[in-house]
Structures are given as structure tokens and as C-alpha cells.
Amino acid sequence: MARPLYQVADVLERNQGNLTEYTGNSWQLRTLHALRKCRTAALGGHIDRCDNPKCRQLHLIYNSCRNRHCPKCQGHKREAWILARERELLEVPYFPRSFGGVHPAGHAEPTLPVRSETGVHYIVQDRMGRFTKFWCQPKVPRGRYGHGGHTAYL
């Protein structure tokens, strides 16, 4: 397999002196340094001999960082997860919609106390009204059964 023209580690190595400017805390900085050092001599390595009887060459293999954010180490797990989620999808078209809230006076919603039942009631009523109005429009694409469904969360 050919090496890609640009890798995350190459970019991080080139900007190594500026990494602290891009991070908000020490955990993020440690993660970037781990990605920068992945599969390099900085993490050490080992020598493997090819099992093929015609080859039998020695290969230097550098150790990985095993960081869950690393595309070299965990990229295959991410791809497997995405494929598994795609198999769970239904064979229907998806049309995700988001309805932002606007206060009746025309400005953004005020911040509500955590257990404000009146505020929660207002938000739910507002969103359901917007949802109903949206699905009643004639140009909205409909699913197989001609109506929409929704998932509501606060």
C-alpha cells in the first residue's frame, strides 16, 4: 500500500512548536503529541521476519501510540463502526430537519431554569407547531407511507 501524500503525524511534526496554541488543556496536547509520535522511532519498535519462504526478509516495525483518536491505530475500528451503523439503517430516505426556537417577541429564546415546567411546555409546544407546519407543506418529500415521523429531545 502506498503511503499517503499527507498524514496527520506529518502536519503535527511540522507544527510541533505551535501545538500549545491549538489546545485548550494538557490532555489535548498529550493526544496531539501521541499522534505525532505514532509509528516512529520515538516510540520504539521491533524487527519482524517475513514468513514467506521466498522472502524471509527482516522488517523494522515501529510501535503504535494506541490512542483512540489516532487514524493510523484506530482508523480500522472507526470504519468497522460506520459500516455496522450503515447496516442498521432502514431502506427509507432520511430528511433530517432542525427547528430552532424564536421567542414570540422576535428575539432568541431566553435561558430557562433547569426544572422550569412552564418553559419546557412552551418549547415543546413551539417545536410541535413548527414540525406540524413543516410536514403540512406540499413540497416536503414524504416517506414510503406518505407522512413524517420525528424524534424530539431537549
Image (spheres, rainbow, N blue to C red):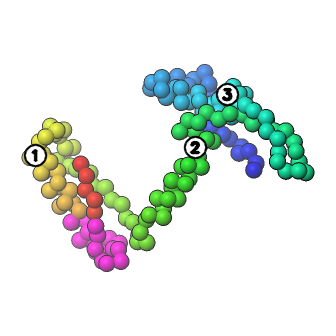
Closer mark to the observer between disc 2 and disc 1: 2
Q: Nearer the viewer, residue 130 or 87?
A: 87
Residue denoted by label 3: 43
In terms of image quadrants, where is residue 114?
top left
First in sequence: mark 2 or mark 3?
Answer: 3
Q: Residue 8, position in %: x, y? A: 62, 37
147 vs 12: above or below:
below
The number of discs equals 3
Residue denoted by label 2: 74
Can residue 11 be seen in the rendering of this structure? no
Look at label 2 and name its amino acid: Gln
Look at label 3 and name its amino acid: Leu
How far apart, in angstroms, are the residues tagged by discs 2 and 3? 17 Å
Closer mark to the observer between disc 3 and disc 1: 3
Query: What residue span does the magenta drawing correspond to?
Result: 132-149
Q: Nearer the viewer, residue 117 or 67?
A: 67
